[in-house]
Amino acid sequence: MDHPAWNQFIFEHGPLSGRFLQSWEWGEFQKAVGEDVRREEFVEDGETVGIAQWIDRTLPLFPGYSFCPKGPVGAWQPREFRQMFLRVEPFDSRLPAYARKTIDLSPAHTRITDLSVSEEDLLSSMHPKTRYNIRVAQKHGVKVQLESSDFESVWSLFEQTSSRGSFRLHGETYYRKMLESLRTSPCRAFLATASHGVNLLAANIMIDFGDTRTYLHGASSNEHRNFMGPYLLHWELMRDAKERGFTFYDWWGVAPLDAPKTHPWSGISRFKRGFPGVEYASPGTYDLILKPVSYGVYQLGRSLLRTVRHYV
């Protein structure tokens, strides 16, 4: 299957949230950061019924495994029996008996805003505090730049946010390569910022693919938070997405609605839920175990290693 046909299949059959992870361009970006990418097509009676973009990974002392983020898409059957397991992210609960739930790698719960309604309807559907904070940012003269190339300043902001929120970042090179390799492709990554004078308030890495704009990564300053930069930044990104003809704005991850207040995503989820949207849930990340004995030993080893690290 060639590049255009691959993406067209994703448009027609992929999940509402995260289709970009199975796009041809995302696979090329993964190659650029050193991953071993393999594309697989499933054909029945001469017709493509499913596709999978795998990231093949090796493991010391064990058979390797393959990861298919937000896929496979469509109908498929495992073929790679040389692997210890296949890590998949299905969009429904139809899973074989040898599937085992593991830690979610892509968000299993998200919120999606319908951009087909008017700006007035979007504003009126917001939480009153969110609408108020957008006006605060506008009154303070916060400026939004939808196509920024100042990654140097933005990276320090991401490090700040990571430290504050206790979440892990990829290396700086990973984000640079994303913005460089996906700059003009059908799966487009770009950097958007909100500033007040010389002060950078917030920055987002966004992904445009198909009919959806996705908020992939975000950062905000520890200072000048009273200017409400993140609120205006998202509002302008939504308005721009509408103008460009996108139908959906994917917030890319929220805590489940019944999650406790101690959930690590509690704060950012409250922020995202201030904007209009509908909650979507998928089963999450699963391992399809192809070599049960090796997998059991591997998991035991990982568990012991985590225990040792905890006490060291």
Image (cartoon, grey):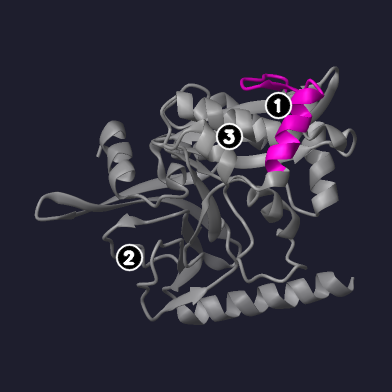
Q: Quadrant of the C terminus?
A: bottom right
Find the magenta span and give its range: 130-150
Judge from the rendering whether residue 246 lies leftward or rightward of residue 199; answer left or right: left
- Distance of mark 3 from mark 1, alpha carbons? 11 Å
Q: Which residue is mark 1?
A: 193
Q: Is residue 203 visible?
A: no
Amino acid type, label 3: Met
Residue 244, image x, y percentages? 45, 24
Whether residue 149 appears in magenta in the rendering, the answer is yes
> Are there few (<14), some (14-19), or many (20+) residues within 10 Å of tag 3?
many
Q: Number of callouts in the render?
A: 3
Select label 2 or label 1 by which is in front. Answer: 1
Q: Secondary structure at mark 1?
A: strand
Q: Secondary structure at mark 2?
A: loop
Q: Residue at x 10, y 50 (%)?
A: 46
Q: Which residue is mark 3?
A: 206
Judge from the rendering whether residue 175 lies leftward or rightward of residue 305; answer left or right: left
Q: Secondary structure at mark 3?
A: strand
Whether residue 103 appears in magenta in the rendering, the answer is no
Label at residue 78:
2
Residue 287, image x, y percentages? 48, 70
Q: Residue at x 69, y 22 (%)?
A: 144
Residue 295, image x, y percentages? 53, 76
